[in-house]
Amino acid sequence: MSPLQRKYVDLIRDATSKWANWDPPIAIKVGAFGKLDRVTGELEVHGNVYEAEFQETLDKIDPTLRLKLQQHPPVAGPVEDDFIISSSGAQKRAFSVAPGIDIMGLATASLKADFQFSQGKRDALLVMHSPRMEYFPPSAVLEQLYHIPALADMYLVTSVFTCPAFSLYLSDKSGEKISLALIASAPIIPSVAPLGPNASFSTGIDWWTDASRGILRKGASKEGEYVFTPLYGLKKRGGWIKKIFRNGDQKQHGRSSEEELWVDVDAPWEPLDEDGEEDPIDVDGSSCPDTFG
């Protein structure tokens, strides 16, 4: 499963410049830092800059490295429209189901679509229902963290997308078509609380799909809680920026913007074949299977 998992992560990264979480129920938090597993594409989290343990570690290294991150917690953005991400070979189509399928709530589902995948190649699909982005507050945290030696060779999570329902899919190269919809499920009524004028219960949501070939993972919070993290932004520390000043064209080392201090992370693997195995390409464009492994 590991190479296919890596293939999914790679395809979503190509489409968004962000990193896909193969296990969205496992939370990834803003401020987490670690390394990418080259085989699976998973982020191996070593810690979080907002945790007290991180400051305690810094105190042991250099007591002068006092961060003020608690004054600048992650920002939670507004709830966004449903977000659909697909690699280049996945084409969204008008929704239709086979005759004879009668699923309660399917006709009125607000999120539903068909997806046609290419034959002979794998493609990835990620659907997030009502996602919300969390991120570092601008101009408050990243410059502080740039000076921390412990983060010099680490990757830093600078933003995450959370949602109450997700579905991800990796096609199997057969050129399949799948239908996908998020429908309201039956009400969830407390079994012990008496029903009265102030009684409450959750309606819930759930996924319906006819996918049967590729790899499908999906989840939905019955309470509508933001418990899934399907996508996150990852940065690494950049270099010092040379600035040129007009007075005598004097050059000195300086810093520019957060975008230059912290840059996007490149994939730690060679180009992948359709099954997620590394497929290095020589300078003349030909494969070099004997060069690696």
Image (cartoon, grey):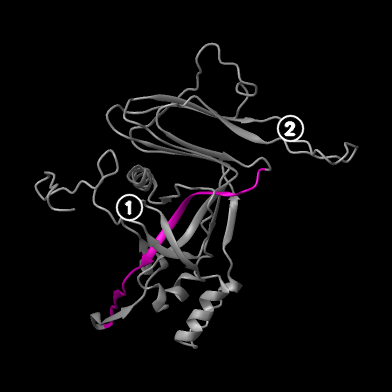
Q: Amino acid at mark 2?
A: Pro
Q: Is residue 208 left or right of residue 232?
A: right
Residue drawn at x 60%, y 16% is 102
> Which one is closest to the eye, mark 2 or mark 1?
1
Callout 2–callout 1 Cβ contact below 8 Å: no
Whether residue 82 is visible here, answered yes or no, is: no
Q: What segment carries the magenta color?
A: 224-247
* Residue 139, disc: none
SS under mark 1: loop
Whether residue 261 is visible here, answered yes or no, is: yes
Circle 2 residues within 10 Å: few <14, some 14–19, many ≥20: few
Viewer-proximal residue, 142 or 244? Answer: 142
Q: Is residue 46 magenta?
A: no
* Figure check: 200 above or below 26: above
- The image shows residue 130 at horizontal and vertical percentages of 58, 42
Residue drawn at x 52%, y 83% is 66
Examine the image and state in which quarter residue 249 appears. Answer: bottom left
Examine the image and state in which quarter residue 170 appears. Answer: top left
Please give the residue where the numbered disc 1 appears in the rendered image.
39
Viewer-proximal residue, 221 or 161? Answer: 221
Label 2 – label 1 distance at C-alpha: 42 Å
Which residue in the rendered view is the most extreme toward the bottom?
63
Which residue in the rendered view is the most extreme toward the top?
99
Please give the residue where the numbered disc 2 appears in the rendered image.
187
Residue drawn at x 48%, y 81% is 58
SS under mark 2: loop
- The image shows residue 205 at horizontal and vertical percentages of 64, 35
Q: Amino acid at mark 1?
A: Val
